[in-house]
Image (cartoon, grey):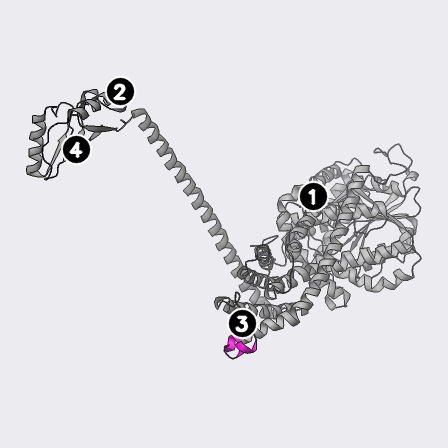
Amino acid sequence: MKTKFGVGFPNKGHPSVHPATSPQSIPTNSGSQHQSSSEGRKNGAVKEISKSKHILTVSFFPRFCMSRPQNYEFQEWWNKQREKHHDLFIDKSETQRLFTSVEIHTPTADPAVDKERTRSARQLSWVCLLKLQQLASSIAYLSNGFVAILRTANRRIASSSVAADSSRSESRLYHAIKVFLVVVLVLLLFELVAYFKGWHFSPPSLSSAEVEVLGLVELVYANWLKIRANYLAPPLQSLTNVCIVLFLIQSVDRIVLMLGCFWIKFRKLKPVAVMEFSENSEGQNVQDYPMVLVQIPMCNEREVYQQSIAAVCIQDWPRERMLVQVLDDSDDLDVQHLIKAEVQKWQQRGLRILYRHRLIRTGYKAGNLKSAMSCDYVKDYEFVAIFDADFQPGPDFLKKTIPYFKGNDDLALVQTRWAFVNKDENLLTRLQNINLSFHFEVEQQVNGVFINFFGFNGTAGVWRIKALEDCGGWLERTTVEDMDVAVRAHLCGWKFIYLNDVKCLCELPESYEAYKKQQHRWHSGPMQLFRLCFFDILRSKVSSAKKANLILLFFLLRKLILPFYSFTLFCIILPLTMFLPEAQLPAWVVCYVPGIMSILNIVPAPRSFPFIVPYLLFENTMSVTKFNAMISGLFRFGSSYEWIVTKKLGRSSEADLVAFAEKESDPLVEGSSLHRSSSDPGILELNKLEMTKKTGKTKRNRLYRKELALAFILLTASVRSLLSAQGIHFYFLLFQGITFLVVGLDLIGEQVS
């Protein structure tokens, strides 16, 4: 389709818009032109539409235009120009006209292009529908998750309110946190009023010229600004600086430990044994194997007693050179019967294994071990291996550890690494695996290689009995009897070896309740021990360097300063600086340095890198438990002497299955003894107990008040930081507050329906 507009210039340049229907529709003689002009004078305007070639022509002649003779000179010049520049014109037949024509061509539609364009539009619509469906599914998933969390929280709040009446009195720390929460809420309301009145941008002043015109609220806010700037912010800033210094010192300690670990890996440093036991012990002299006592202390370990006893009893060690002691402190009669039956079963298979039960459970684990070591037959043994009830040593454990004592008469302890059968069970076990991987891979290994001292982990280790007797044996004065005996042995001049390549399978606590109780005991006990042995360290005959390492690094920096600054800096000072902006907490302290330290901590467990942010937030959340435990141990509060056995679930591993298969196919086991064991009338009753061993006290998730109170404090401070547009501080407070909320509602770890 084309549209043509004609613009004509009549005699002496009078403008007109002339209808140009076609080149033939307008004759070139003057008579036709005069007739057209006369018609224009009568009607004022003439509009013609030629539909044959889709040409629209509009012509307008004013009434005052008059007919004049044709200007032939201009006509000749115009014709010459059209012939010369014919490419600029549409049709050569119009060379005699006094107007120009412009044609506008509309492109015709291509069917193939239209089809392709239609197909693309249809595909685009389908893509948009798929995107909308995905978005709707995501929104529905998040909504369902949020509703499920709210229902779970509501259910736990309701159940906890019923049990709160019978709970013991609230802790001192919880009272302090509640007061702090009330203060923070009042300050937030005050700051919101100030923000909406615009006082954050132009604060009221207490100058004499303005005091008379200030209102009551403005006067109070002006006085508050003066008090916080002159009296509150300076001490808070001083405390902040102290915590920052402690934080940097502890960070340097972590970096030094990591450098030591890298050096060990680079130089391939590790302890070397002067002799090895062959895998096949049949051809060797039995007298070459030293006498080893194996102890398994346990207390109401219904879920794990079988696998731990079985793992110890299948040790590849001459049976006449090994004695197993099952030290049962259970107060549950059913559990006692089950453990007795298990011991009798292995006795019938030819194992030298004894069952010991104390009627009076004093001293907890230390008292249990001390009682076992007081037996007369212990003097016949040279080494003692200790395994907690949930530990499953490999069959070659003794063959890999005992040789290191040969030729090292001053060696007291060989400690092995823990490996976890349930490290991928839930988020809580994954985060624990990061912590313990750093502890064994870095702390224990570096201290073992460079200073031959580290804290005994209480299990999966072999002691020289002479060293235990030399340092005074097991004492019941703390809840960390393993660390106590290690420090005293170190002060007596004994050395330790850590084997990072020998692993012993065990369990991690899967519920937050069990993990919290374990961490409370692990952090209150060292402070008890530090208070008790401080002067013993000063009076000991070891070198000044070892004394400084024990006091400054082992106790103060890693056991006292770490929980103190972690809780104080991120749970107290950071929220306060939002309401006292005159005290500054730099962004690199809040974000960058903790991030770097988290990366260093996670290096020994590289598979856990996706959990680096939850790990950082969770460690800050656990600081309240560790700080509370540290204070209770340092100042001898009652909870510091509380011993609660960490709950296990009896997670089995492939090693257990192999061990039990080997046990059942043991050629030394006689068929008659097996038949006699299974036909014992007492076993039938024990089988009934075994079938009902999972029943008992109903487990349920709890609410943790200190964590919930701190969650509200941090979320309140995040609102205040949002008013001040502090980006990093806001995000840190927000996510840290959400983490406290999740932990306080017991939404991390094992979930009990």
Residue corresponding to mark 2: 84
| Dot 2 or dot 3, earlier in sequence | 2
Q: Secondary structure at mark 1?
A: loop
Amino acid under disc 1? Ala
Residue 148, image x, y percentages: 50, 54
| Dot 4 or dot 1, earlier in sequence | 4
Residues tagged 2 and 3 counted as in contact (Cβ below 8 A) = no
| Dot 3 or dot 4, earlier in sequence | 4
Residue 352 visible at all: no
Q: Secondary structure at mark 2?
A: helix
| Dot 2 or dot 4, earlier in sequence | 4
Residue corresponding to mark 1: 605
Separation of marks 3 and 4 at Cα, in angstroms = 80 Å
Amino acid under disc 4? Lys
Residues tagged 1 and 3 counted as in contact (Cβ below 8 A) = no
Separation of marks 4 and 1 at Cα, in angstroms = 97 Å
Image depth: mark 2 or mark 1 in front: 2
Separation of marks 2 and 1 at Cα, in angstroms = 86 Å
Up/down of 314 relative to 110, above or below? below
Image depth: mark 2 or mark 3 in front: 2
**What residue is drawn where x is 18% and y is 20%?**
93
Residue corresponding to mark 4: 12
Instruction: Give the quadrant of residue 627.
Output: bottom right
Mark 3 surroundings within 10 Å by alpha-carbon count, few (fewer than 14), some (14 through 19), many (20 or more): many
Residue 488, image x, y percentages: 87, 57
Residue corresponding to mark 3: 204
Q: Nearer the viewer, residue 88 or 660?
A: 88
Separation of marks 2 and 4 at Cα, in angstroms = 24 Å
Image depth: mark 1 or mark 3 in front: 3
Tag count: 4
Q: Quadrant of the C terminus?
A: bottom right
